[in-house]
Image (cartoon, rainbow, N blue to C red):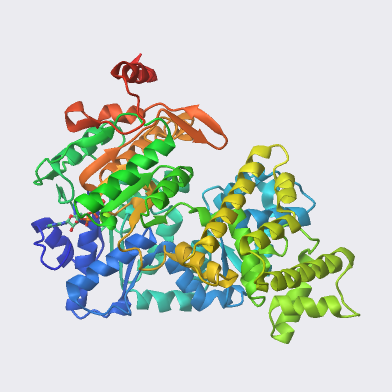
Amino acid sequence: MGTKVNLNPEQKLAVDTIEGPVLIIAGAGSGKTGVVTNRIANMLNHGIPQSNILALTFTNKAAREMEERVKSITGKKLSNLTVSTFHAFGVKILREKIHYLGYRPNFTIYDPTDKNSCIKEAARELKLKYEWAELNELSNIISGLKTGRIKWDTNNELHRPLYDEYNEHLKLYNAVDFDDLIVRPKEILESNPEVLEEYQNRYKYIMVDEFQDTSILQYNFIKLLADKYRNICVVGDDDQSIYSWRGANYENLLLFERNFPELKEIKLERNYRSTGIILEAANSVIKNNTNRKSKDLWTEIDPNAKIIQTSYPEDERAEADFIAETIASAVIRDRKKYDDFGILIRTNGLSKAIEDSLLACNIPYVMSGGTSFFQRKEIKDIISYLKLIVNTDDDVNFLRIINTPRRGVGKKSLEIMIGKSTERRSSLYSASTELVFDQFTPLKGAAHSGLADFIDLIEEFKVKFHDEELKISDTVREFVEEIDYWGMLVTEHPDNEKIAKWKYDNIQTFIDFITRWENNPDNTEPTLQKYLNRITLITRSESDDDDKGKVNLMTIHASKGLEFNNVFLAGVEDHILPHQKSVEESGNVEEERRLFYVAITRAREHLYITACQKRRSMNDTVEAIPSRFLDEIPDNLKEVVECDNVVEEEEEAKVFFSRMPWKK
Ligand code: ATP
Ligand code: MG
């Protein structure tokens, strides 16, 4: 909501109630986030300093948009206002106070794959052996234990040594995992009353958007901060609760009501976002859920275009082409802007075909939420190596790959290297070089030779990448063979060569990208450094502000709180939405329905829904079945359009339709 919006009476009440606890539970598009931003503006008008205000939300993008909205209402520079995600807020506290935990200030944050590698290393230290698949499970258990979602009991006491070793490893690498970003700051606040008081006095006014998805841990963290002044306003929508698997659920609400009994509750029922058709579709879908606070959500926006459901594209390529071509033609013919479009997917795996088609149509896009191609572990590993070759002082990347593939550098050797680098105030790479060539080196056999080979390798390729006679892509290919990445993949996935192949295939695609780039005649004097800068720009775009004018490709989870004039919802098939796992674990279909509801309610004017006949997943092609949720949208709200490569004969289409199991 910008400056010129007239708040309705309920919204106004919420905006004017600055002191004391406030609870707003209301449907999609009813102006909850707008209330938060207007409330902040109102506080600033009342002379409350920016530095006293803390607003938390779920995604970086949502936080950025929130800040933008406040800026446009107040016209003020907001250098002291804290609008961020819970995790970014945790990082902020850790940057200021991590020394309370005995860490060095410049800590690294491990993503899930880094985390798995770290668990694996900790396990190796304890002489335990795990398969990759087990690692994921362990990672979940460790996360559960750390965040308190799983209690320590006799059953999982057996994980204690690994749990401790893992955390020691993290500390050794001066790294924290995602859970630590909330757990650790909370720990610091709980065990240091003077620090707690410092933050309580700093953040006297606290607001939480998307409260339905706040985990109990996050809730308790924020409650600590709010306990002294009790100015806390939480807003959310139980119908959009989509993180129960991460420990967020209805309980927060009950806790909030119990902990802040003096709260004021405010209801918002008018939707200002979507057309009548889209809202009706959303309402028809969500009413099939049983466990919800009932709401009357209405809009005055005219029912407009019907929801477009494509007749079934043959496969994910045809689906992706349909999406990309529809966008391209809307931009050219109707002068639409790229950032008017959102493409939503249930799972990360659906992005590759869509990324491909967007690139082919020259459509600029930004991916948020899930992992873009460049963030896959195998691609990141290679990029880390290349970055280290370009700049050997890059300690972060050094640590990332020093044992990928393994080269016998264990915990002890690493401690020696870190010690040396601290003593010499030099990078880990130069400290290692010194250690390798020291005739009294404390490094032992395998570690010593492993490290010596590593340094040789980096030096050799430093020279090769500087050789203008050689193609960068060829040198990268040679490098990947030299480190035997394939061998590592096979060892990591001994009983699943498919995964190994798939990952290796991704690396080949990456090398193809480089080839295409360096063969482009516009690209004079390509260098490795230039290429790396270029990808850094692509992969950094989540945190930058340069995603204006780009199509937004994202997981439904990441789309929460956002809105687009035009939304494409791809892969609306059984096994995808609802997701196979959720159907098997009964009771989770309602959560999947909420996801579908979130996706529908992102659209303002146009909503496109697609489902294919066949879909490739991993190395298999499977028959796809349209999602059971499609039936919950009344027919009069939908229009079926043809898209290329679809089932041509109407008869065939009928046969296809009849395959849907619940029709029988
Ligand atoms: P979600 O549940 O998806 O997070 P929300 O409840 O946070 O939605 P907002 O994003 O704040 O809703 O608002 C939805 C849209 O409605 C925005 O485009 C906003 O500008 C508009 N809007 C909200 N209130 C008003 C109003 N009083 N007058 C005009 N437009 C409004
Ligand atoms: Mg919102």
**Compared with residue 210, is residue 322 higher up or lower down, i.e. above or below?**
above
Determine the residue located farthest toward the top in the rendered image: 664
Of 46 and 651, nearer the camera is 651
**Compared with residue 143, is residue 292 higher up or lower down, i.e. above or below?**
above
Of 31 and 152, nearer the camera is 31
On the rendered structure, is 265 left or right of 324?
A: left
On the rendered structure, is 455 left or right of 83?
A: right
Q: In the rendering, at what x and y percent does residue 468 appear?
A: 65, 72
Q: Which residue occupies 67% across, 66% down?
A: 470
On the rendered structure, is 66 left or right of 383?
A: left
Q: In the rendering, at what x and y percent does residue 194 appear?
A: 47, 79
* Residue 186 shows in this picture: no
On the rendered structure, is 533 left or right of 298?
A: right
Of 239 and 395, nearer the camera is 395
Q: Give the image quarter of residue 62.
A: bottom left
* Residue 520 shows in this picture: yes
How many discs appear? 0
Ligand 2 is found in which quarter of the picture? bottom left
Q: In the rendering, at what x and y percent does residue 524 appear?
A: 51, 71
Q: Which residue occupies 44% across, 67% down?
A: 88
Task: State which quarter of the image contains the C terminus.
Answer: top left
Q: In the rendering, at what x and y percent does residue 427 appear?
A: 68, 79
Determine the residue located farthest toward the bottom in the rendered image: 424
Of 316 and 169, nearer the camera is 316
**Compared with residue 121, is residue 79 higher up or lower down, i.e. above or below?**
below
Task: State which quarter of the image contains the N terminus.
Answer: bottom left
